[in-house]
Image: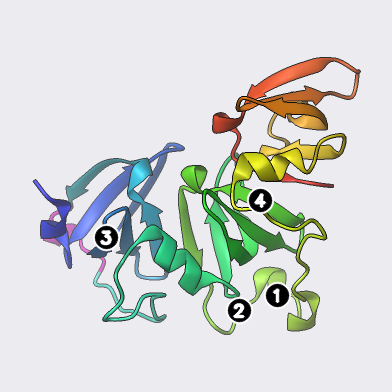
Amino acid sequence: MNITKYINKTVKVEISGNTTFCGELKAVGQDIMILYDRTNYLYIPLLHMHRLHEINEDNSFGLQETIHPLTEDNMRISYRNILQQAKGKFIEIYVTGEQSLHGYITNVLNDYLAFYSPVYKNILLSLNHVKWFTPYRHELTPYRLNNECFPVKPSNITLVRNFEEQLKKYEKQLVVFDLGDHPDKMGVINELANNIVELITANGESVYWKLNHLKSVHVP
């Protein structure tokens, strides 16, 4: 049964990362849904939806929209199109760990995006691991920093279309995977081949990670 039948109804959605959202289902595209939770529009790739069900009207939020969505009425709703609409806008985005990232998308590539964060600076995020994202209200900036604190600072390495090929540019450099959620995800990339990363950790040991399971990378 297609979940589009729940559009304009209040639903509960469970997604990867043991996360649950409740709100009004606004739209469903081929690979993404849009949920409004009374405060924010949440863009959730369908890849990470585990369960969705309708909430009885007695539990409805009585939603009153205070912000505008990233989509336009005549826009084909897709994950990639919405990411393109979000470029340059302040957003909150969740990929891994106990914290989300705050900043803006600078580029959308084949299987990853480039993101600028005032905390982590330039960071690359795998499109397959983005769980959800939401735009800021127009009057807000991350951490209430002044707009001049957010110049576009693209990486000095030219971005290529593929995540694996991009990481090969970081060979012999110190990197942090997945925001350092594990001690063995910080080190120097010694080699990347066949979707496996050899990382030299602080104590000089080699640790091997399957690239498909790595969600983000940044150069400290």
Percent of width and height locating residue 177: 70, 37
Residue at 10%, 58% in the rendered image: 5
Q: Which residue is mark 1?
A: 144
Q: Which residue is mark 3?
A: 29
Placement of 213 over or under 175, stated as above or below: above
Q: Nearer the viewer, mark 1 or mark 4?
A: 4
Q: Under tag 4, what secondary structure?
A: strand
Q: Which residue is mark 2?
A: 140
Q: Residues within 10 Å of mark 3 (few under 14, many from 20)?
A: some
Q: Residues within 10 Å of mark 1 (few under 14, many from 20)?
A: few
Answer with the quarter of the image where residue 78 lies: bottom left
Q: Residues within 10 Å of mark 2 (few under 14, many from 20)?
A: few
Amino acid on which the number 3 mark rests in the picture: Gly
Placement of 214 over or under 95, stated as above or below: above
Amino acid on which the number 2 mark rests in the picture: Leu
Q: Under tag 3, what secondary structure?
A: loop
Q: Under tag 1, what secondary structure?
A: helix
